[in-house]
Amino acid sequence: MKFADLHLHTQFSDGTFTPEELAGHGASLGFAALALTDHDTVEGCARMAAACAAAGIEFIVGAELTAEHHDTELHVLGYFLDPQNQKLLAEIAKFQAVRQNRIREMVARINEMGVPLEADSVFALANCKSPGRPHVARALVKAGLVSNLDEAFERFLKKNRHAWVPKKKISALEAIELVHQAGGLAVMAHPGLNRTDEIIPALVDAGLDGIECFHTKHSTTMSERYLEIAEKFNLLVTGGSDCHGFSKGKPLIGGIKLPYEHVGKLKEKRFARMAANSK
Ligand code: AMP
Ligand code: ZN
Ligand code: FE
Ligand code: FE
């Protein structure tokens, strides 16, 4: 059996692995295909593509975009994106500018709470254009200001805590359009985490291509539910670990093994759309 993991993060956003380390873990685990889906960036994809090619793994360019629909946050995964697409890159640049300002704002709020974290220490640790809350949490641990990441989220960073600052979101309908115009397929990420089932029909009307049925945080019941929804709306099925690095002492990649036939179906839809667009 061939397997894929289509939801992975590296140091180009808030993951802790380099693309080479991630591809190395993928190779040891015997994956046939991997997709990189860093938050609001495609920057790591060139290195990941090279590392996967060297390991004999098929690679799919991807990204995870933060979106919303009627005030509900959801994440849109784009697959087979053209990493040079100008509109995509322009939109990503806006996301990244907001993420960087947001780090300063979160640090200022942490300072208001009497905790002397420095924004530059977060930027130095993140060393990427898409910094996020995990980097603030890691900088707090590194500075000895909290004892672990959970404490950082509990005290400061969880939604509605004092230092929580919302991110830039684009409308889910725009996200789907952005992915399509960049040559990609648009997939709703981990629907079980956002509890956003009621918005699925509107996304399908906007051209949603697939739904992430298999995810580390989906129970078996959830996966079954989303497989039924995929069938009902004629959506492609995807899945991935959402690996950000080590979890409980081992790499999270490997926890989800998507049967490769789903990658084949994604490619069929992508080629059919390319053929239709070139007419
Ligand atoms: P951001 O995109 O900056 O809002 O950060 C979101 C990321 O933070 C997620 O992808 C998770 O990796 C991580 N995260 C969110 N909530 C928690 C939490 N309570 N504990 C640990 N990590 C979290
Ligand atoms: Zn993340
Ligand atoms: Fe996500
Ligand atoms: Fe993710």
Image (tube, rainbow, N blue to C red):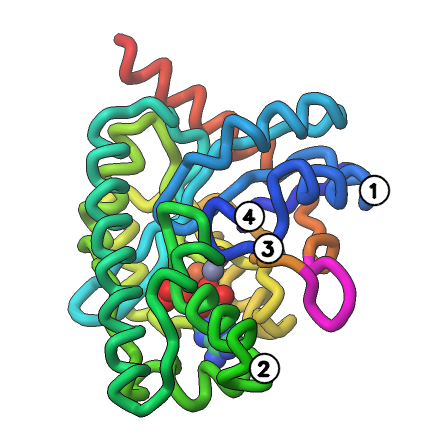
Find the distance from the CA under tag 3 to the CA under tag 1: 18 Å
Counting residues from the start of the chain, the first of labels 1 and 4 encountered is: 4
Give the mark toward the camera: 1 or 4.
Answer: 4
Find the distance from the CA under tag 4 to the CA under tag 2: 21 Å
Residue marked by disc 4 = 10
Find the distance from the CA under tag 2 to the CA under tag 1: 29 Å
The secondary structure type at the circle numbered 2 is loop
Find the distance from the CA under tag 3 to the CA under tag 2: 16 Å
Q: Seen in the image, is 231 located left or right of residue 181?
A: right
- Give the camera-side residue of 227 and 160: 160
Q: Which residues are magenta?
A: 246-252
Counting residues from the start of the chain, the first of labels 3 and 4 encountered is: 4
Name the amino acid type tagged 4: Thr
Residue marked by disc 2 = 148
The secondary structure type at the circle numbered 4 is loop
Residue marked by disc 3 = 16
Name the amino acid type tagged 3: Thr
